[in-house]
Amino acid sequence: MTVAVYQGVDGAYSQLVADHYLRARAIDAQTLGVPSYRAVAAAVAGLRAEVGAIPIENAIGGTVREAYDLVAEFALVPLEEVLWRTDHRLLGVRGAALEGVREVLAHPLVIAECGKFLGGLARARAIPCEDTGVAAREVARGGNPTIAALAPAAAAQMYDLIELAANCADDPRAYSRFLIVRAAHLREGGPLEQVAPAARRKTSLIFSLKDAPGALARCLQHLAQGGVNVSKLESKPRLGHGTEHTFYADLDGDIADAAVATALAAIKRDAKTLVVLGSYDAHAGAPIGANDGPVRATVERIAETRHVRQPSVFPDAALPRVSRGARPEGSTLQIGGVRIGDGEFVIVAGPCSVESREQILATAHAVERRGAVMLRGGAFKPRTSPYAFQGLGWDGVALLAEAGRATGMPTVSEVMTIDQVERMASQIDVLQIGARNMQNFDLLKAVGRTGHPVLLKRGLSATLDELLGAAEYILAEGNPNVILCERGIRTFETATRNTLDLSAVPVLRERSHLPVLVDPSHGVGVRRWIAPLCRAAKAVGAHGLLVEVHPNPAEAKSDKDQALTFDDFAEIVADLERIPIAGPVTQR
């Protein structure tokens, strides 16, 4: 599972903090970027991640109140604080020069921290973006030497950028403060069970008071009488309560300390509301900086495991999240009760198109009884002819979802446009990107932002570099749940519908940690040749198959020549039992 989540993409300061936290505990596991602080909190509270890294304070911008509020709302438990020096570098593509920069992408707080430096770039303007990782990634993607990013040094290695200027912050002491948080209940057997508290602790709380003279002074007096130091106190208007305010406070000490416990009990009597977020390890020493050992180790780890360059036909083909080096042990996806990854061989079966309720239910029950573990079916069909059957649309989606519920199988269906993504994700378990949309980059970004499992098919004439590049688009948006699919490519050969490139399977498994399925139905297009290709796909190391099955292939509204009968499918599944599952890839 994902162990640490953060807001943003690789290269964001939050990602460096999360990576540092794991490394300090010798936990070699995946970090995952998500779109928002709320998504971080939800992932941790929902036990989809062990911990989250959330910024709670900036030396210039002040308190990140949303982070405090989310810790309270999701009842998260703070584990420790991390002070991270925000050492900003100006990064550009190879060949860029400082004097040629006209636009600088940066997080708004970074722009504030680098005001003097940006003011010295008389011909450049600053453009706010979501985080430092996004800034660096977009500069790398664009390849424009006049556009640069303010980001940490680690981002240069991740995105193959060069450093145009260092020491860009107005004050070299600028830093941000992060909290590492976990759910209220630890996952049994998780990596955090044996973590012991540090000697120096802090406690954070949120409280509100009556709007009356001396109310705040009385609360602070309770702390002073107990000898409890208040290291931070900020306020904001309390929504819906006129002149009342909510206060955010950090105290030195643990709630288990008698002095702290006594002071909090007294505050509770005087306050209108009091939420104690919890006690956590205080940061020891100065903020961690880019020239300190822990950061250097983090950068080295990123360079070693996340930025593996492969030979490519296009120049910006670094694949920091897709490459095998990012997860040498390989990725395993859990979709409902189905595991896809090394040690597993799954069969996804169903009709090319959902044609009616009777057809999809009959097919679903038939393939489930005969060995399928996931159900496929097209509702939106991209067809070469505008007059061919285009699918039932949303009615087909509803019918496929019903068939999935009836059999307990997760469902797979193709999404064709950005405006379909959110609605499709609410009903279908795996979003398929078809061959014709493999390089629809806006669509790839859209499915990437959902976090939903994605089945990515190889394009009709796509190289493996291009397939992996398309997968990188999805993972770069923070979605690690991607399955690659070889479905045949267009060559000079006309004896079969396409040329099923089974050599792609070992290549993809060596180059990427993502699971690989094979679709022999589209690969060959002829029913009687599908069985031997199924055997070959399993033998060569595929993690599973995607095959088309229909109650009556002769009457199928699409792809009738390649649709299997129920008996055909049963024979193939039985035949596959004789072939062992391929073992894990060994890095050479």
Image: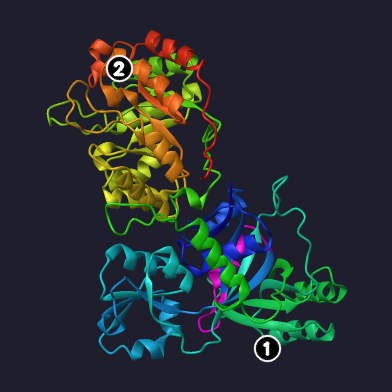
Q: Does residue 385 belong to the magenta stretch?
A: no
Residue 146 image point, x, y percent: 25, 76
Please identify the quarter of the rendering in which residue 558 is found.
Answer: top left
Tally of numbered discs: 2
Q: Mark 2 points at which residue?
A: 563
Q: What range of the chain is rendered magenta? A: 57-78
Q: Are marks 2 and 1 in contact (CB under 8 Å)?
A: no
Q: Residue 364 carries which label?
A: none
Quick check: 539 above or below 259?
above
Mark 2 element type: loop
Q: Position of residue 360 (x, y in %)?
A: 36, 20
Q: In this view, does 549 lie above or below 308?
A: above
**In this orientation, does residue 354 appear?**
no
> In the figure, residue 279 lies in which quadrant?
bottom right
Which disc number belongs to residue 213?
A: 1
Q: Nearer the viewer, residue 525 or 243?
A: 525
Q: Which residue is drawn at 31% across and 31% down?
A: 501
What kind of residue is marked 1? Pro
